[in-house]
Image (spheres, grey):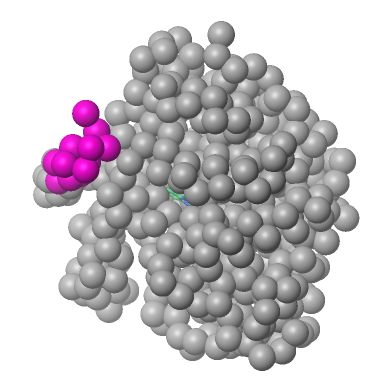
Amino acid sequence: MSELFTPYKIGPIELRNRTIRSAAFEAMCPGQRPSKELFDYHTAVARGGIGMTTVAYAAVCRSGLSFENQLWMREEIVPELKQLTDAIHAEGAKASIQLGHCGNMSHRSICGCMPYGASRGFNLYSPTFVQKMNIKQIHEVAEAYGRAVELAIEAGFDAVEIHAGHGYLISQFLSPYTNHRRDEFGGSLENRMRFMKMCVEKVVAAGKGKVALFAKLNTRDGFKGGQETDELIEVAKVLRDMGIESIVLSGGFVSRHPQYVMRGQFPTRAIVHYFPWSKWWLKVGVGLAGKIVAPTVPFKPLFFMEDALKFQAAMPGYPFTYVGGVISRETADEVMENGFPMLQMGRAVLEDTDFVNKMKADEKHCSGCEHSNFCIGRMYSRSMQCHKKCEDITPGLVKAVEKVNRQNDKMERKLGYKK
Ligand SMILES: Cc1cc2nc3c(=O)[nH]c(=O)nc-3n(C[C@H](O)[C@H](O)[C@H](O)COP(=O)(O)O)c2cc1C
């Protein structure tokens, strides 16, 4: 039997196998609270054999919200979250929750204030100016991380995942691209890590020994002027030394190079189709410039492996979690063989909630996801769904997805990523 299907202990918990459904935003939380759709979705993932499923992108406080359908951690939703974790546990899986703050990508009408980030700027999506965080706000958000962990424990979660990557608030402080501060939170790496350390200190104080502590970190931001691997390895060491029990190695910067996060084409057609006319400037803007602003990065299996191995070499024995391009039993086994004790999967499980059970039953099993990224395009305005199961998909959108899939196939064969 593959190591993939053996139990694994991390922090105070034991997973039934090494697979984790990565935090992939469900957009199923109208009113910033869990819905039946979210409940049914994660219960189905748990039933599909996963070791642990991650509820994505919960804001630690209201100022960190950027979507109408995004979770906001607060006392009043704990009973509903408890029903969700109970249902996940009843299926034999563990439950994790990703905790974050959108920072300069928060949406003014949802987050209840003028959005703030590491430095001042402009948020095209909202659209609004963004303030530079003051010391009071910095302390408030760090406190909110600790409080969110307490709420997650009360709600029955087994793990928390601190979002320190992808250009969200912690990552905005870490990256020289978004951090232009001249105070003790900007400049040197030590200074740029200060906000992250304040948040993680609260997280560890609230959660150590009660839940498994994960953080999601970039291996690199993925563009010139962004944060590079050498610095991020130092960040990973700090996270380890502070008590984070596993780091999920990802990459990319949603506001600057989104396709580096998950590869493939930016789903322009789906985004434009689902954006309501009330956001006409985005419909027009994305339609005209989407592909230029968010250039394609060809998908390949295990696309973060090369960089992930550099982290592993620099921190031998530390239990990193691999994410990025796990598409089959073969690639999952390769992750194990490369010494990663756990792996996360996004799209393979989004496309089929039974993916893990199918991999277990068949060594040749491969995901049917062709990474058109339709699920991402839809997620900006409606709940996240794979195009294969989407009830309101139009014939025009089906054609667009098929076209993208043909282009992907051609490009990946040309580059030798696909046989
Ligand atoms: C629809 C969708 C939503 C996502 N939302 C998040 C998110 O909320 N937080 C996060 O850290 N990553 C998010 N991601 C990235 C995934 O967690 C994962 O890192 C990425 O898709 C690569 O893994 P994969 O190749 O297995 O899909 C999202 C990905 C998809 C496809």
- Residue 237 horizontal/vertical position (percent): 72, 55
Quadrant for residue 313, please give it. Answer: top right
Q: Main secondary structure of the magenta part?
A: helix
- Residue 238 horizontal/vertical position (percent): 75, 58
List the single residue furthest toward the bottom: 182
* Residue displayed at 88% across by 55% down: 205
* Residue displayed at 41% across by 13% down: 363
Identify whether 221 is placed above or below 403: below
Q: Is residue 46 visible?
A: no
Q: Indicate left or right for 208 with 220 as reference.
A: right
Instruction: Please check the rendered image and state whether residue 6 is part of the magenta-colored stretch, yes or no.
Output: no
Q: Quadrant location of the N terminus?
A: top right
* Residue displayed at 49% across by 23% down: 333
- Residue 284 horizontal/vertical position (percent): 21, 74
132 and 97: which is toward the camera? 132
Q: Indicate left or right for 213 with 351 as reference.
A: right
- Residue 79 horizontal/vertical position (percent): 73, 44
Identify whether 172 is placed above or below 75: below
133 and 398: which is toward the camera? 133
26 and 172: which is toward the camera? 172
Instruction: Please check the rendered image and state whether residue 410 is part of the magenta-colored stretch, yes or no.
Output: yes
Q: What's the magenta region?
A: 407-419
Q: Is residue 226 visible?
A: yes
Total numbered badges shown on the rendered structure: 0
173 and 333: which is toward the camera? 333
* Residue displayed at 28% across by 49% down: 298
